[in-house]
Image: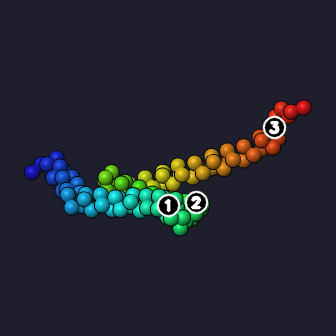
Amino acid sequence: MTNHEHISEHDAHAHGEGMDKKRIWSVFFVLLALTALEFLIALGFVHHWGILQKGMLVNVIYIALTLVKAYYIVAFFMHLKFEKSSFIVTCAVVFFFIIYFIILMLVEGGYLHTVMTHQPTFPHK
């Protein structure tokens, strides 16, 4: 057996442990349940029954559910769960830097907006 055949067999075995039909359907039903829960909260608890009020709590719930859904999509359908841990850490660090820079730009934009509206460059006479 040549080295190339050995490597290709190893790669086929490593990727074969990933997604089978049972796991695909289980991930599908988890994503379906999370989406149904989001719709139940949005349409039922907030708008129809009035149990929850729009605000920070509802936003935090939506963000948490969306992050769980994003984890399932990235981990299983983009096969990141089956990669080496160093690659996962690299992707996570990049993701956190992107989120950090987005937050920095939002804070800076909010500051500039308040400064420019309270101290206009050309005040009205």
* Farthest-out residue, right: 125
Left/right of residue 91 with respect to residue 104 in the rendered view: left
Q: Which residue is drawn at 38% across and 60% down?
A: 36
Label 1's element?
Answer: helix
Q: Residue at x 54, y 64 (%)?
A: 50
* In this rendering, the label closer to the viewer, 3 or 1: 1
Residue at numbered disc 3: 120
Could you say which disc has been placed on residue 48 in the image? 1
Q: What is the x, y in percent for residue 109? A: 67, 44
Question: In this orientation, does residue 58 appear?
Answer: yes
Q: Which of marks 2 and 1 is nearer the N terminus?
A: 1
Could you say which disc has been placed on residue 54 in the image? 2
* Farthest-out residue, bottom: 51
Q: Which of 50 and 18 is in front in this view?
A: 50
- Whole-angstrom CA distance, mark 2 to mark 1, is 12 Å
Is 52 drawn above or below residue 79 in the view shown? below
- Whole-angstrom CA distance, mark 3 to mark 2, is 34 Å
Display coloring? rainbow
